């Protein structure tokens, strides 16, 4: 009896740390989600957490439609291979069959893949249409891929093109942001607004890729592609060029800061080009400066008049 009591007590003491660990892990889920939102996670499996509704649809298509279908087909084919290896090897089946066709089996393996592809297409085509049916944009940004950095322009806000380079490692460590993902000048967008990005290239092919928003398109010189997203959560989202574009391909990240509308308005006010008062003052001053330049011309006869006077004095 005493032994049983000690064993029960030992199991209880052993289970307490496990229970506490599970509770702590459950409590840490929201914090972990907040930390991993918009950035890759070391040793993680699966897609990044979604940052907008369009990405939710893409994640559903991957996790609920494609992944189970792929797993089921792979397991079915693996089962067939094992069954054929075991049942029809030379030892188990020394006399092979002589038939060459099986009409019912051929009908099945033709119809079943067609049905599988039909189900996939039923979810794939609406998703593809949703990606290309861009709603009315609240904000338009032009993104240009260069070797090896990005430049951004806000035409509606009159923000001239600015350069976004990779943040140096020392600065990234000091700021506590991920190296090779943080930039010197990120994209800034307001939360809950439809953002359309016009993507082009300046030299070679690049790719504009933000996993949390589920957007990716190629930056082609001489051509403009479009992507859109509608972020629903404040935070910082990272992407990168994932088109092999040269020796420093790994050093052109994309950083998107999603802020409130008030913070976005303040950022636009700080970035918008303001007209300098100097050119305005110089424009009206130029006509008045003309007579000043003409004055020496009118005074030219004065020295010529003094010259005869000097000659008469000498005489």
Image (cartoon, helix red, strand yellow):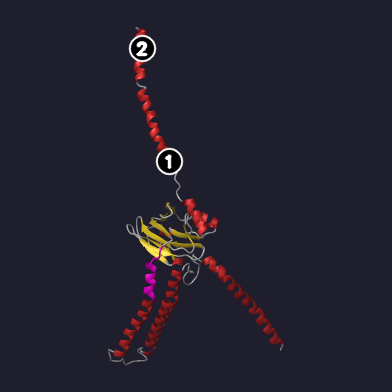
Task: Tell me the quarter of the image containing the N terminus.
Answer: bottom right
Residue 244 location (% of width, % of height): 37, 61
Residue at 47% over, 51% down: 271
Residue 232's disc number: none
Q: Give the percent coordinates (x, y) of residue 162.
A: 43, 52
Residue that lies at the very extreme toward the right in this rendered image: 2
Residue 107 spot, x, y in % from top left: 31, 87
Real-space Cα separation, disc 1 to disc 2, in angstroms: 48 Å
Q: Which residue carries the number 2 mark?
A: 309
Residue 102 visible in rendering: no
Crowd class of label 2 (few under 14; some 14 to 19; many from 20; radius 10 Å): few
Magenta stretch: give its range: 123-136
In the rendered image, which residue does mark 1 sit on? 280
- Closest to the observer, 4 or 154: 154
Is residue 62 or residue 133 the one in the foreground? 133
Residue 67 lies in the magenta-colored region: no
Q: 107 above or below 62?
A: below
**Residue that lies at the very extreme toward the top in this rendered image:** 315
Is residue 313 at all visible to an observer of this figure? yes
């Amino acid at each position: 009896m005493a032994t049983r009591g000690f064993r029960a007590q030992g199991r209880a003491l052993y289970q307490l740390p496990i229970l506490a660990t599970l509770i702590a892990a459950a409590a840490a889920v929201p914090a972990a989600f907040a930390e991993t939102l918009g950035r890759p996670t070391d040793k993680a499996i699966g897609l990044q957490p979604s940052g907008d509704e369009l990405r939710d649809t893409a994640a559903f298509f991957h996790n609920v439609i494609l992944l189970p279908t792929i797993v089921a087909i792979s397991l079915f084919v693996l089962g067939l291979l094992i069954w054929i290896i075991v049942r029809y090897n030379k030892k188990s089946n020394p006399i092979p069959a002589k038939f060459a066709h099986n009409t019912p089996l051929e009908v099945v393996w033709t119809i079943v893949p067609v049905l599988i592809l039909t189900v996939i297409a039923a979810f794939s085509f609406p998703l593809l249409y949703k990606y290309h049916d861009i709603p009315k944009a609240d904000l338009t940004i032009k993104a240009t891929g260069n070797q090896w950095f990005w430049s951004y322009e806000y035409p509606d806000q009159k923000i001239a093109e600015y350069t976004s380079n990779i943040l140096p490692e020392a600065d990234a460590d000091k700021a506590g942001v991920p190296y090779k993902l943080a930039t010197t000048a990120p994209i800034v967008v307001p939360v809950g607004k439809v953002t359309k990005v016009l993507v082009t290239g300046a030299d070679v092919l690049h790719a504009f890729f933000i996993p949390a928003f589920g957007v990716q398109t190629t930056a082609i010189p001489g051509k403009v592609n479009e992507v859109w997203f509608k972020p629903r959560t404040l935070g910082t989202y990272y992407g990168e060029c994932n088109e092999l574009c040269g020796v420093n391909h790994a050093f052109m990240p994309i950083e998107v800061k999603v802020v409130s509308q008030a913070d976005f308005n303040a950022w636009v006010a700080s970035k918008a080009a303001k007209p300098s008062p100097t050119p305005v003052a110089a424009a009206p001053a130029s006509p008045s400066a003309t007579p000043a330049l003409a004055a020496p011309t009118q005074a030219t006869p004065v020295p010529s008049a003094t010259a005869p006077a000097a000659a008469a004095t000498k005489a």
